[in-house]
Each structure stands twice: as structure tokens, then as C-alpha cells.
Image: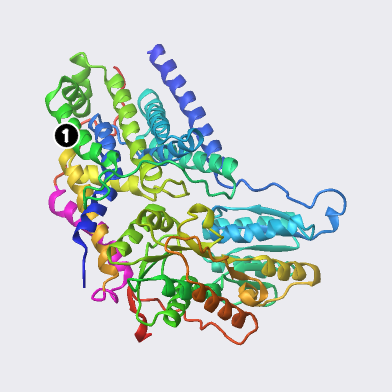
Amino acid sequence: MGMQTRRTWRHRALAGVAAASMVVLAACGGTTGEETTGGGGEGTEDLPLIYGVFATPLEEPWDGAIHAALQSAVEDGTIEYKHVDNVNTADAMERTLRNIASSEQPDAIMGDAFAAEEAVRKVAAEFPDIPFAFGSGEDPVEPNMSVFDNWLQDPAYLAGMIAGGLTESDVIGVVGAMPIPEVNRIVNAFVQGIKETNPEATVKVSFINTFFDPAAAKQAANAHVAAGADVLFAERDGVIAAAEEADIPVIGMMVDQEEEAPEHVVTSLIWHMRPTVDAVVEQAENGPAAVDLGEYSFMNVGGSELAPINTDVVGGVPEDLVQQVEEKEAAIMDGSFTTPVDESAPAGSIDVSRQ
Amino acid sequence: MSINLLAALAAMLTVATPLVWAGIGELIVEKTGVLNLGIEGTMYAGAFTGFLVALRTGSPWWGLLAAILTGVVAGLAMAVLSVTLGLNQHVSGLGLTLLLIAGCEFTFRMLYAGGRPKLDDKFDAWLSDVPVLEQHWLTYVAFLVLAPGTWWVLRSTGLGYRIHAVGENFEAAEVAGISVNATRYAALAVGGAFMAIGGAFLTLAVLGSFTLNIINGRGWVCIALVIFAKWRVWPVVLGALIFAVTDALQLQLAITTAFSDVPREVMLALPYVAVITALAVWGRKVHYPGSYLKAYRRA
């Protein structure tokens, strides 16, 4: 009996140690970005402290774009920057924001509010002196809650023109995350761009219903190829691998993805968050505002662009198509052309001539 | 409306492959009475270490070996928690999954912060010009070696009887001279290896790259498949095929003119609806292994 009790005790102790170490290790994987990435050296004290609070891991391209822009501002010596990521529930977002606002007293807080719109607005109201600037599908709130979003309709339109000009089967496949406004307006602008260079085309649109599942996205892209598509648009990761196997051109997203498949990625839609960040830094210095910062993502202010067209891609890119795209790009830049914004959910199969 | 049936069948086999590997891995473990909810994390760790080693060595074969070892270690970790320490299997398994996923994400970030590394050399498909049969070798092994092999071992060998005895009544098994804990340890190690291969299939054969959330719930689908199959090998394979073919068909149907305006959510739910329907039809009166979820303590 005594033996038995001792053994049980040892088991319990071991179990406790095992459980505790698992919790500690698991916590390590979550938020890792508390390091200060200040400009370094003297003068750091005078720089505004911008705090990034992200709902997803930084590897997710959307928050990755915000993080990259903030880091570039650090490199230019204009801000001090700290961040946390993977704050993936509304209550965690609320607690984290309140903690940071009260204990760190940053000069501005940036992040994404899509999964926690109410929580972010609640904390913003509690700290009216701190500018809050969040990626959001809703409106700004006085006095200090500004919103932004990735308004990539301009490069999407140009990419559509390229896709329309490259297809020979007149079928183009798009794999997106889910039919939400920010994705819809990119896909719809892409379709409008196709219509300009190829009014005969059919556009097939798939959604994988998650932001991250490259295997599912690849499968969806394969279904497009099976349905006759010979140009793909990779709104999500996984599609480029399918294009490589099918040996057809593909358009990338968020960053220039040419390196991933130099013979297949013809161009990419790029989001530059730096103009938005600079606008937030201005608020940090001059006091908060409640504005929609969306226009800072437009192409004519340098908020987005189309990556250089890769003419070495399989099948090549006709010279006159490149010229046509460049002319349209110039028209967008000088304001003589405005890309239409349509946030309705696209159908699964779109006959471009009827758009 | 045009459906490319051959492409759908090819997609079915590819989509089902990781489910067959991991599902059979889980089946072997559960046959000994242990529910391994570490499956999602084990697949994730297999996908990650397989990719990492393949990237560093330049060979997907070394990657596969690393994935197998990772799966064995993950299985043994689960064995320490649930067999030696006799902890609650649900908690141990979920803890293991959380730990493995977080550990992989942490390591990935430390090594490749913000980068998108890609394998120069991944496993290529065999018979790339033949419709439907244009599959990776791991797919062939899953359907032609793993499934029949496991079926035969469980059905006709002493080892199979041993596993069955431990899973149904471990006291009786121990009386008959079978070491319950050794059998469970072995099953967890082998099952873990199969789960890890299922995960590594995605990085080493399908994609050639690793991204967060790469498993995205496929492990949980396998847990459901094993129950659906009532702990039998061929129904696991059948369930995986039903899930995969529904998924492949919905992807094709959703982009046809006829189904173009059907709500996406309905189409995306189809594979799950198919599995739940199959469960409702065939999965009733489930007989769980007798020693399911119980830790063995020698009296």
C-alpha cells in the first residue's frame, strides 16, 4: 500500500512537470514579438512609439504587410516600434490593447480589427488621447479611431488586363480566400481588367473559405485547369505550385512572388502600407483623428502597385499588351482613369461580356 | 456545365492520401485503446520537419526520414503522457497538438522570419501523362501497401491479435502474458510515424513549401473517419475517398455556369455533409474498443 501511494505521488509530480513545461513551451509559439526595434542609439526617446497589435501570426501576408511598413519606418529612424501578434480572439484583443495602452502608453496603436471590431472600438474609446489605426471593414469613430484596408483594385485591374491578354483558351481561374469586401473588390476589378483586353473571356472564381490552406488552394487551382483555365490568379498561397505543374502563367499577391516561380509568375499585386503608416505617425505627433485612411493604399499615392511584368514567363508577354498596361497605369496615376470599386460577391463562373 | 471526371478522380486520390496515412495511423493507436488527439500536431510536425530537412539537405528522402522520426518521437511523447503517466487522453493529446504546432511555428519564424522558402527538389508525380494514375508514390504506397498491409496484420497475425486483446480487455491481455504498455507504446510510435508521413506528403510532394496552418484540420477529419469506420481499415480508406471525391467535385461544380450562383457555403460544406451523412447511416451502434480512453495500471 505504501509502495502504491509513493508511486502514485511520483506519477502526479511527473505529470505536473510535464503539463507545466508544455504550457510554457506552447506559450512560446504564440506571441513572440515583444522585442523593441527602435531606431537605436540616442534620440530614440524622442521618436513616437507605435505599437503593432495583430490578430494573426505575422506570416499571414496581410498583417505581414503592415509589419513590414512599420519596420521600414524604424529603419528610416522615424519611429520606435513594438508589436505582438497572434492575438486571435476578440477578448484577447481587448485585454491586450488595454494592457498596452495603459502600461506602455504608446503614441499610436496599429493592427487589424476584422475579427474584433467591437473590442477595438471599446478600448479606443477608453483612451481618447492615443490614435488607434486599424484594418477594418467598418467606419472610423471620433475622436481617435481611424481605419484602413487593402484597396488593391488598381493593380488588380492592371493584372486583369494582362490575364485577358495572355489567355488562349479564354478561361481564367481565380482562387480567393472568402467572399468578403476586400477580396471581392480585388476579384471584381480583376474581372473588369480582363474585360478590357478580352471581352470573350470566362472567369472562374473559387473560394477556399480560409485565409491559409495552400493544399486546398492548389486543389481549387487544379480544378480551374481541369475546366480549361490557362492563366491563374493566386489571391491565396498554393496556386503558384499548381500553375508550375500545369506550366501556365500565374499572378501573385501582396508581395512580388516572381522568385517563387520565375518562369510562371508574370506579375503580382503589391500592397505598400508605408503611406498609411506615415499618416498614422503624423497623428502620433500631432494628435489623434478619426479618418478613413483607405486612400493611402491607392496606387496614385504609392499605396499599391503592380510588380514589374515578367516577360520571360512561359509563353511570353506580347509587347503591345505591356504597352497597353503601361498606358492604363499612367492613366490611373494621373487620375484620368479611376478603377471602379465593386464589393459584391463574384459568381463562380463569370461571362465577361455580360459584366 | 462540364465536369472533368478524370481530373476529379485524380484529385480524389491526392486529397485522400494524407487522410489515409494519418487515418490508418490513428486507427492502429485507437485499436489499443488510446485516443491520440495529438494527430493534428503530429501531422503538422511531420510536414514541418520533413520540409525543413529536405530544404537543408536538398533531398526529399532525408525529409521523409526526418518526418518519420518526428512522428515516432511525437507518438512516444503521447505514450509517456497517456500510458506511463496515465493522464487523461483528451488533455494529453490536445496538449501535444498545441505544443507541436506552436513549436513548429516558433522554429519556422526563428529560421525564416518573413521568408517563403521553397524546395528545389520535391517528390514528382509518377506516370505524369496518364490521367488519374498521375500520382505521387506515397499515394500508391498508401492505397496498395499501407492499407492492405495494416488490414492483414490486424486480421491475421499474432501482432494483430495482441493489439486487439489490449484494446478490448487489457486485464485479460496482461493475464495472457501480453505487455499492455509495451503494445501501446509501439502502436503510438508506428501510428505517429504514419501521421507524420501524411503531413509530410503535403510539403514534400504536393506543395514543395511550408506555410502556417498547412494541416488545417485534416487531423480532426481523420479522428471522425476512424469512428465512421468503426475501427476497421477499409472503411477508413472508403471514408477518406468519399470525403475527397466530394471535395474534388464541389470545387469543379462551383465554377460551372449551372452552379455558379449556388451559395459558396453550401458547396464548401458538401464534403463534411457527406461524411456526417455517412456517419448517420452507417456509424450508429458504434462499438468502442473495450479499454478505450482507459489508462492501464497493474493491480
Q: Is residue A323 magenta?
A: no
User: Residue drawn at (49%, 24%), measured in percent from left and top?
Assistant: A13
User: Residue drawn at (52%, 57%), measured in percent from left and top?
Assistant: A258
- For the record, the magenta segment spans B257-284
Q: Residue furthest front?
A: A319
Which amino acid type corresponds to the residue marked 1 in the rendered image?
A: Pro
**Residue A86 visible at all:** yes
Secondary structure predominantly adopted by residues drawn in magenta = helix
> Is B10 left or right of A66, judged from the image as shown?
left
User: Residue drawn at (47%, 78%), measured in percent from left and top?
Assistant: A193
Residue A285: give x, y in percent of width and height.
Answer: 80, 68
> Is A157 left or right of B15, judged from the image as shown?
right
The chain to which mark 1 is attached is B
Name the residue carrying label 1.
B148
Residue B259: which quarter of the image? bottom left
Q: Helix, strand, or loop for circle 1?
A: helix
- Quarter of the image with the C terminus of chain A is bottom left
- Quarter of the image with the N terminus of chain A is top left
Q: Is residue B262 magenta?
A: yes
User: Residue drawn at (66%, 53%), measured in percent from left and top?
Assistant: A83
Decide: is A112 above or below A81.
below
Residue B95: give x, y in percent of width and height.
Answer: 44, 38
Decide: is B100 above or below A58.
above
Is the residue marked by circle 1 packed among few (<14), some (14-19), or many (20+) residues within 10 Å?
A: some
Residue B286: give x, y in percent of width and height.
Answer: 16, 43
> Is B6 left or right of B89, judged from the image as shown?
left
Residue A289: which quarter of the image? bottom right
Decide: is A238 above or below A171.
above
